[in-house]
Every structure is written in C-alpha cells, then in structure tokens.
Image (spheres, grey):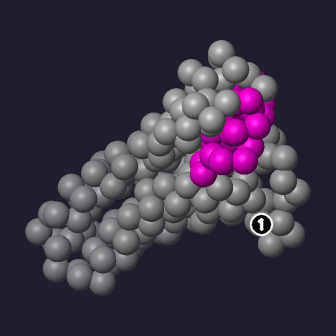
Amino acid sequence: MLLFFTLGILGNLAHCRHLYSSFADSAVQFFCGSVFTKLKYEYGGHMHYKKFEELPCWNKARELSQVVFEMIGQPAFRKDFILKDQVWKACGSLTDTIAGGFDSGSSRELIRLLGYAQRSCSEVQSQLYRALDCTYITQAQFDKVSASVAECRQQIKGFRKYAQSHSSEKPDAKTPPSQ
C-alpha cells in the first residue's frame, strides 16, 4: 500500500488508478495539487491536462502574446511607451492568470481567475482601439489581433463554463458570472 501511495505522489497516479482504482481515487482527492487533476477523476476522466501548458486557452493566450509582441515592435507603436506597456502587461496577465488558476487547487479560485483572464482580453481589445485611433496600427493589423483576442476570450469562456459545470464547490458570491 505504501508503494502505491508513493507512486501516486510521484505523478504516476493515472497509471496507478487503472490498476488500483479505489486507492488512487482516494489519493487524488487528498493529495493532488491541481484542481484539473481532481476534476478529471471526479468527473469520469474528461479532463486530461496535467500541466497548464497543455490547456488550449493558455496556448491561445500565448499565441495572442506573440501577435501583440509583433505589433508593439513596430516603429510608430514603440514611441508610445505607456500604451505599449499596458497592452503588453495585459497579454502577460492572460497567460499568468490562467497558469495561476490551473495550479490553485480550488475550483472556485480557478473560475475566479479565468474571469480575470476574460477581462484581460477586454483590456487588450480596448487598447487595440486606442492603437488604431492613434494610427499606430492599420485596420488590417487591428482585425488580425482583434480576431486573436476573440478566439482567446472564447477559449477562456468555454473552459470557465466547463469548470463551473464540473465544480463540486459551491460558487462564491463574489465570483462574477461568465461574460
């Protein structure tokens, strides 16, 4: 029994679960640091993410950061240090907040942080309008980055709804509804 417990702690819980299901289920509920791993076993194995880098919404936010980095590197944009800094920090907030929610260990915290990530998408979108209005970017560039923001927001929103529907924790009264 101690050997199986040790295997679970070392991260081989998925393999262990198939062989020793009742023990592994208990170990998941008591010892897993990731709320997603807990959700995976509590809700029939639908979740299969072990690291935040595997999350589609995190990867989409990372892609958005790459597109924004390209945009803010343009000569006209580089001169507006404040706007450049704001849009870059909002993009960084997206990936950081999703990663933090993944490792929070709480469904409620995950849902709350995914809500913050959605709002970071709105910040990026608002800053895009300012960049367009100041003619730092063209309409075509705006459309490209705006589409990336919309895809990212949709990924986060979908994952947040999934987490809400599969959470065994009662929702926090302070947690804002999905946008």
| Magenta segment boundaries in residue numbering | 23-45
Q: Residue at x 16, y 79 (%)?
A: 79
**Quick check: can you spot residue 74?**
yes
Q: Is residue 170 found left or right of 100 in the rendered image?
A: right
At numbered mark 1, what does the secondary structure look like: helix, strand or loop? loop
Q: Is residue 129 found left or right of 168 in the rendered image?
A: left
Tell me where residue 152 appears, x and y as whole percent. 49, 47
The image quadrant of residue 81 is bottom left
Compare residues 43 and 5 and report the one nearer the observer. Answer: 5
The image quadrant of residue 91 is bottom left
Compare residues 42 and 161 and report the one nearer the observer. Answer: 42
Tell me where residue 23 appears, x and y as whole percent. 74, 30
**Extreme-front residue of the structure:** 2
Tell me where residue 145 appears, x and y as whole percent. 36, 51
- Whether the magenta-drawn stretch holds residue 135 is answered as no
The residue at which mark 1 appears reads as 175
Identify the image quadrant of the C terminus. bottom right
Identify the image quadrant of the N terminus. top right
**Extreme-top residue of the structure:** 19
Tell me where residue 78 appears, x and y as whole percent. 17, 73
Q: How many marks?
A: 1
The image quadrant of residue 43 is top right
Rate crowding at label 1 as few (under 14), some (14 to 19) or many (20 or more) other CA atoms within 10 Å. some
- Identify which amino acid the numbered label 1 is placed on: Thr
Q: Residue at x 24, y 59 (%)?
A: 69
Q: Residue at x 72, y 47 (%)?
A: 30
Compare residues 141 and 34 and report the one nearer the observer. Answer: 34
Reply above or below: 50 against 146: above
